[in-house]
Image (cartoon, rainbow, N blue to C red):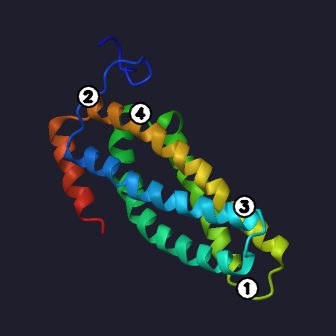
Amino acid sequence: MSGCMSGFGGMPQAELSKGLKQLKGEHPPLLDQLDELFKLTKQIEDEKDIEQNFTVLITKVKEFKAELDPHSEREEGVLFPMMGAYIGTTSGPIAVMEYEHDQAKSKIAAFLEKAENDLLSSTEKKNLADLIKNAYFILTEHFAKEENVLFPMAERILTDEEKEELYRKIQEIK
């Protein structure tokens, strides 16, 4: 392996340690939920039963957020600082990952803050649903970056002891 950019260079991915495998394994159920959210936003955008779909969207966004928050905390509170000791956190991959987390979470929060207003017009509901559609695009791309670049990079730079510590610490976040 030449250099530490093999995740970018098309070299084979390393087998992930327990903690990184767990973080990666949390993505498929989150992506399934995101797909469901996206379908609802498209229904709303296409003006198909806006009232019913918007009500379902609110419920599904709350369920998604309940699953996303602990996953994000495992990354932001444990993985990112551990990697940051090696590659820094103010620029580069960690800064990008944190920025994307913040963008997605702020769109979800803005949606939830305004969505349960009974006086929203159809146009306002469509605009709010757009926030969730934008979060979908951010997070689907974000998960792919983590799986193809960040997690393999972590596998290469963290020591075996740090990988064990990562696994232990992420188990504590429920």
* Closer to the camera in the image, 39 or 101: 39
Give the CA distance from mark 4 to mark 3.
Answer: 27 Å
Instruction: Please name the residue that numbered disc 1 is placed on.
Output: 117
In primary-sequence order, the first of circles 2 and 1 is 2
> Which secondary structure, mark 3?
helix
Residue that badge 3 annotates: 130
> Considering only order in the chain, which callout, 1 or 4, is on the residue closer to the N terminus?
1
**Of the residues under marks 4 and 2, which one precedes in the sequence?**
2
**Position of residue 168 measured from the top left corner of the image (x, y, whole percent):** 19, 56
- Foreground residue, 65 or 5? 65
Type of amino acid under label 1: Asn
Q: Which residue is mark 2?
A: 14
Closer-to-camera residue (26/93): 26
The residue shown at (42%, 17%) is: 9
In the image, residue 100 above or below residue 41: above
Residue at the far bottom in the pictured view:
118
Q: Along the horizontal axis of the image, is 129 left or right of 59?
A: right
